[in-house]
Amino acid sequence: MNKQKKNNKKRILFSVLIVTSLLLFTVSISNQVYAACPQGRVAHAMAYDSTNDVIIVYGGTTTTAYVDWSFETWVYDYNNNAWTKMSPSETPYGSVGTQLEYDSESDQIVCFGGNHAEDFSSDETSVYNYTANTWTPQAPNANPLLRVGHCMAYDSESDVMIMHGGALTPDYNPYGDRITYNDTWAYDLNTDTWTNVTPVASPLGMSSAQMAYDSESDRIIMFGGYHSPYDVPFMDPTGQVYKMETWAYDYNTNTWENATDILVNPDPRLDHAMAYDSESDLIVMFGGHTHLNNEDMQDETWTYDYNTKTWTEMIPPTGLQRSSHQMVYDSESDLIILYGGFVATSVSTYLSDLWTYDSNTDTWTMIDQICTPPTSKTNFYILSLISAFAVVLVMKFKRR
């Protein structure tokens, strides 16, 4: 009898071990299949790290009315279709409307400006090292003034960041009235130095324009943006607020050139996205909104060829209109990657989808992300089945 009790105890212990193993296996499989993904967001910043072949996403806002400011750093690996939340110990001060650009010579991401919260803007420069997972505040000799809505691009031939424009509204501006900047700055990460290089002939003060570096032509291309006729001190006598001009900046000669296509031109817009496809030698532009209300957004895809100074509207089979999204060019995969933004009919719908654009086939393709973990009910059913199996197993042993 004692021997039978001992055997029963062994069988119960064995059953418990089986249950525990199955539970651990279930949790493990669940974590592998259902990866964490960032929430939908707008006004975030994004850059492609070509050395590590990953995309860095920082900041933005994840709910309506810009009330939930994100200071998260995420990394997306296109080859493995995987997001990773990095959780560095420090983050930049500005998170909404900031700019990220990858410095390939230093293998680091440079971040400048943006808004910190509802009443604060930033003039700080920070650097992100993906390998070390660290954000490091810089201490340059001089900073451009506080701003948001500026644009930045990395000139790889000269190894400098070029930053242009941006604005401060009265709510964010400690200097007084609304300001729209038309200044141009160069940042050298090697010496941690910002230099005001604004030429005499420059574009009007501009906010929410976009620009990208054309490495084949060694020019930074800028399109669109917002210029209020009431801004100071750079007033546009035409009164036009949404711009449709194309500008090219040459750092070597420190000159801005009006490179607008005189025959075909995209509509004026802001909060669009641009990226340079080096394999096709084309600037790709998508989306944005074109009038003074948030619902008039675009699903147009355009390419710009600086060699001929021409814009061409592409006709991909799938439209995905939105604004305040971000795009980068993944040179390893030869694809444009688009992430986030909000949809045309509702500013309350913040998007977390990922798309690729192939310039060779003029095709947008949605990436199928597996981001939603099993619901609590699903977990309950799984655990219930495992528990039922364990009970049956124990009862069977007892009968023996």
Image: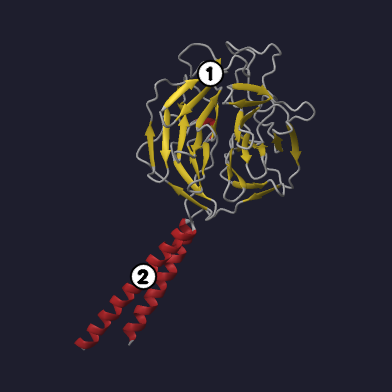
- Could you tell whether 221 is left or right of 38 in the image? right
User: Can residue 269 be seen at all in this image of the molecule?
Assistant: yes
Residue of label 2 = 21
Q: In whole angstroms, how far apart are the C-alphas of marks 2 and 1?
A: 59 Å
SS for dot 1: loop
The furthest residue to the left: 2
SS for dot 2: helix
Type of amino acid at the residue the image marks with label 2: Ser
The vertical placement of 290 against 354, above or below, is above
Residue of label 1 = 169
Query: Depth-wise, is mark 2 or mark 1 nearer the camera?
Result: 1
Type of amino acid at the residue the image marks with label 1: Thr
Q: Earlier in the sequence, mark 2 or mark 1?
A: 2
**Depth order, front residue of 61/329:** 329
Quadrant in which the N terminus is drawn: bottom left
- Could you tell whether 15 is left or right of 203 in the image? left
The label on residue 257 is none
Q: Position of residue 34 (x, y in %)?
A: 49, 57
- Could you tell whether 217 is left or right of 381 in the image? right
Q: Position of residue 298 (x, y in %)?
A: 70, 35
Which quadrant of the structure image shows residue 305? top right
**Depth order, front residue of 90/126:** 126
Q: Residues within 10 Å of mark 2 (few under 14, many from 20)?
A: few
Q: Position of residue 90 (x, y in %)?
A: 36, 36
The vertical placement of 127 against 395, above or below, is above
Q: Position of residue 283 (x, y in %)?
A: 66, 37
The vertical placement of 323 against 121, above or below, is below
**Depth order, front residue of 252/220:** 252
Q: What colouring style does the render use?
A: secondary structure
Residue at x-position 38% and y-position 66%: 23
**Depth order, front residue of 111/160:** 160
